[in-house]
Image (spheres, rainbow, N blue to C red):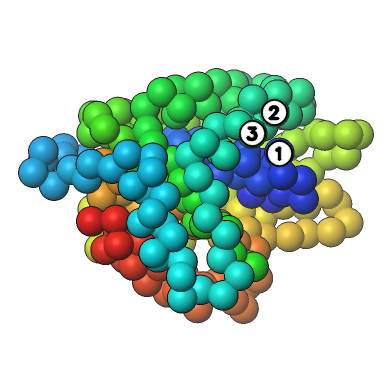
Amino acid sequence: MMGQVVHESRTRLVAAAVLATSLLTLTACNPPAAQNTEPTAEQAVERSADELNKSLEEFSKDRPGAKVVSDAQLRKGIPQAQQWLENVEIKPSKCGVTFAAPISEQLKNSVMGAVELKDQYITVAIYPDVEALKTAWDAQAEASNSCARYTVKSEGQSRAFHLAEQPVKSNAELNQGYVITGSDGTRTSQQLSVRSAAVNVLVGIQQATTKEQTADQLKAATETVNAVLEKIN
């Protein structure tokens, strides 16, 4: 989550990628309604890291300036990203544990890839074990109420964050969208975060937004989710 709003460095960009494809992208102020997340084996996608990378390259070929980030590249930067997450001060303190702890689990449970665009970051995680994705999605709902508002202190600067739920309707069975507003008391910025899960595939999209841009960006993000799922399937 924090990497979405302070991603100037490569370490923080990697943090954004991991958090976007894990249970750490928290829900909005109200917990989501219960949903049936029971997968069917016939629908599960099977892809190796190389196969996912090739699918993302195919998806990106008509998108000028797109850069595909492989599973290996993400994993290489994750130790630094996790260290950064563990070294910042987060209040409530329990939210810090929620943010940092599951990264190693993400590494063990999925194959990852990302596409970096000029104004958007797309992440994909494929879980060989469909139940692992269901567990991650359900755990996210449990964390929503306690960490919908939090503050992050890093390098002597403190920022307060708030998550506001947004409507998302893609071809995936499960969808969540949020505008994350961050402020240091002087400047305020917003990030749009969209997550969609189709059986054992989790797609995340992050980009800067404003009140005037959000509606159009949500529509475009939904179309992007559908295009990614179509290419992977």
Identify the mark nearer the N-term, 3 or 1: 1
Total numbered badges shown on the rendered structure: 3
C-alpha distance separating marks 3 and 2: 6 Å
Question: The C terminus appears in which quarter of the rendering?
Answer: bottom left
Q: Position of residue 208 (x, y in %)?
A: 65, 63
Q: Which mark is residue 80?
A: 2
For the N terminus, the image quarter is: top right
The residue that disc 1 covers is 11
Placement of 43 over or under 72, stated as above or below: below
Relative placement, left or right, of 22 versus 184 is left
Q: SS class of the residue under badge 1?
A: helix
Amino acid tagged 1:
Thr
Inspect the image, locate mark 2, and give the three-letter code of the amino acid beneath it.
Answer: Gln
Picture coordinates of residue 220, whole percent (x, y) = 45, 74
Rendered position, 34 above or below 190: above
Whole-Å distance between the Cαs marked 3 and 1? 6 Å
Q: Residues within 10 Å of mark 3 (few under 14, many from 20)?
A: some
Between residues 122 and 5, which one lies in front from this camera angle? 122
**Mark 2 Cα-neighbour bin, 10 Å: few <14, some 14–19, many ≥20:** some
Q: Quadrant of residue 85?
A: top right
Q: Are marks 2 and 1 in contact (CB under 8 Å)?
A: yes
Residue that numbered label 3 is attached to = 77
Which residue is nearer to you in this view: 2 or 76?
76
Judged left or right of residue 151, residue 4 is: left
The residue that appears at 25% across and 50% down in the rendered structure is 198
Picture residue at 41% right of the left edge, 23% below the top: 108
Contact between marks 3 and 1 (CB within 8 A): the answer is yes
